[in-house]
């Protein structure tokens, strides 16, 4: 039985990725994307969540590209990131279930959720503004995915494009939004509060 169904990435591609070469990143993305998705899906059994976390794995790869050591095993590095995101998601779900139960029990005793709702609405408005800055086709694909909850295949069929194009556009939209959010220190704090309060 094969342990891996994919050959190692060319070390020259990793050196170019480390230097910020987007074409090298695309090569890494298309080589490992389905592999990472299947790994995450096998742990969570949630297709939509697995798709989101797969995108986040590659966001991390791009953000941490300068720390990549092409001489070391990239596969292990990639899947360590994927595994950690799965662990964090699992912890967040457990914490969310516990907090939801607590909030339901105190719903009639406090109005603290009002402020949280205002913060959440402010963040949604800011994200909406960022989405408006996306190129038209990227915005359309992103909204079909995140607002209408269509699968990548459904979007590809509707727009007569390939699924790879859909995946790439969603990834680039997420990377843009995350980068803009990280540039806003106040929003970064707000996001942290929201994550802990989900």
Image (cartoon, grey):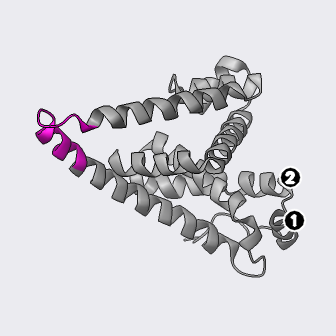
Left or right side of 56 for 117: left
Residue 180 x/y as whole percent: 67, 43
Q: Give the range drawn in magenta.
A: 99-112
Q: Residue 132 carries which label?
A: none
For mark 2, what is the residue?
23
Residue 105 lies in the magenta-colored region: yes
What secondary structure predominates along the stretch shown in magenta? helix
Q: Which of 171 and 160 is in front in this view?
A: 171
Residue 117 x/y as whole percent: 36, 32
Check whether the beta carbons of the residues at disc 1 and disc 2 lie within 8 A of each other: yes
Q: In which quarter of the image is residue 181?
A: top right
Query: Which residue lies at the image location 43% right of the left edge and 36% below the top edge?
Result: 119
Query: Which residue lies at the image location 53% right of the left edge and 53% below the top edge?
Result: 38
Residue 192 x/y as whole percent: 45, 52
Q: Quadrant of the N terminus?
A: bottom right
**Above or below for 130 versus 91:** above
Left or right side of 186 for 194: left
Mark 2 nearby-residue class (10 Å; few <14, some 14–19, many ≥20): few
**Above or below for 154 versus 176:** above
Query: Which residue lies at the image location 11% right of the left edge and 37% below the top edge?
Result: 109
């Amino acid at each position: 039985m094969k342990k891996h169904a994919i050959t190692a990435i060319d070390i020259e591609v990793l050196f170019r990725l480390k230097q910020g070469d987007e074409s090298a990143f695309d090569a890494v993305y298309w080589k490992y994307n389905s592999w990472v998705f299947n790994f995450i899906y096998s742990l969570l059994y949630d297709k939509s969540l697995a798709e989101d976390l797969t995108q986040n794995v590659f966001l991390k790869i791009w953000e941490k590209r300068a720390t990549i050591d092409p001489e070391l095993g990239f596969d292990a590095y990639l899947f360590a990131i994927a595994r950690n995101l799965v662990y964090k998601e699992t912890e967040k779900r457990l914490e969310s279930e516990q907090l939801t139960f607590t909030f339901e029990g105190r719903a009639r005793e406090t109005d603290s959720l009002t402020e949280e709702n205002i913060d959440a609405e402010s963040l949604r408005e800011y994200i909406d503004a960022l989405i408006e800055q996306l190129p038209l086709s990227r915005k359309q694909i992103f909204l079909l995915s995140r607002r209408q909850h269509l699968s990548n295949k459904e979007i590809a069929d509707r727009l007569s494009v390939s699924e790879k194009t859909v995946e790439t556009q969603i990834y680039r939209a997420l990377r843009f939004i995350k980068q803009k959010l990280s540039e806003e220190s106040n929003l970064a704090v707000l996001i942290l509060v929201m994550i802990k309060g989900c």
